Amino acid sequence: MTDDVDDADDADMTDGADGPSGALGDEPAPEGLSLRGLRVVYRAAGGASVTAVDGVDLDVARGRTVALLGASGCGKSSLLRAVAGLEDLAGGTIAWDGRDVVRVPVHKRGFGLMFQDGQLFPFRDVAGNVGYGLTGMPRSEKRARVEEMLELVGLPGYGPREVTTLSGGQAQRVALARSLAPGPRLLLLDEPLSALDRALREQLVIDLREILARQGTTALCVTHDHGEARAVADLVGVMEAGRLLRLDAPEALWADPGSEKVARFLGLSTA
């Protein structure tokens, strides 16, 4: 998922549904990821349609991290999968640096994806997992890149280890190293720490923020954990029923949620 992207037609960046309170509105989209009017619709039993993502506009500037918060079923993971190219769109555009990537194959978008359970390959050692996406690279360069990534995530010397011997936290660090190794222009994180216990999550979220900043990685993260979103992201959005209700810097969002609905989700008093 990290090969160079093929040229695609310039995106027609027409507006979709009204943007969330606190969003960029009609300002030009920054360099990086831009979603306009994004819609994902599933077919339920009996042929009925279920709208999972409903007209979302969202920008993720280069080198920044945006976290999307929401309850289970709010559409945040469907949005992430649509950006990755794993879900068909019912409407809207996905663009990188102003170029539409909707028709670009998944493996050519240059996006990395990390799931909550890491999904490591059990038949490969740690080095084999981290180097999986480094196809076509000379062996010496590949070895050096793997070592660099393991050092980055705090696991120097772990290359020969079998992944079945790793703790949960170590496995997630290996998964992160694998996602970062090819140098993705966008990293998509789907509940990356939710499978871990709270104490470990609190430590890893600090490390994750530092790693993304050190690499200058652009990232879109979905999570249900308020603390995780506040710690890792430059901007935090709140989703409900497929819509992006609010998007702002963490401090601003918690100081002024903008609506009673968002305030309740954030656990703030509305009295």
Image (cartoon, rainbow, N blue to C red):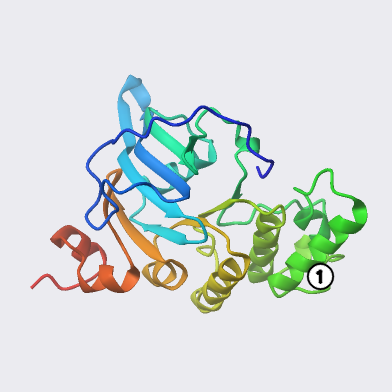
**In the image, residue 222 above or below residue 12:** below
- Is 10 left, or right, of 204 in this rendering? left
Picture residue at 30% right of the left edge, 52% below the top: 239
Observer-nearest residue: 110 or 221?
110
Q: Is residue 35 above or below residue 265?
A: above
Q: Is residue 214 above or below residue 90?
A: below
Horizontal relation, residue 186 to residue 236: left or right: right
Q: Point out residue 146 in the picture as x, y percentages from the top left corner.
A: 80, 61
Q: Can you tell which quarter of the image residue 250 is in?
A: bottom left
On the rendered image, what quadrant is the N terminus found in?
top right
Q: Residue at x 53, y 71 (%)?
A: 209
Query: In terms of depth relative to the viewer, which is nearer, 46 or 194?
Result: 194
Report which quarter residue 161 is drawn in. Answer: bottom right
Q: Nearer the viewer, residue 10 or 92?
A: 10
Tell me residue 152's x, y (percent).
70, 71
198 lies above or below 193 = below
Tell me which residue sits at (63%, 51%) in the image.
184
Q: How many marks?
A: 1
Residue 168 visible, this orientation = yes
Q: Nearer the viewer, residue 122 or 23?
A: 23
Considering the numbered disc 1 on the image, is that residue within a helix, a strand or a loop?
loop
Q: Of the residues shown, which amino acid type is indicated by label 1?
A: Tyr
The answer to whether residue 162 shows anywhere in this view is no
* Residue identified by numbered label 1: 158
Residue 115 in the image: state x and y as whole percent. Answer: 57, 53
Q: Position of residue 84 (x, y in %)?
A: 53, 41
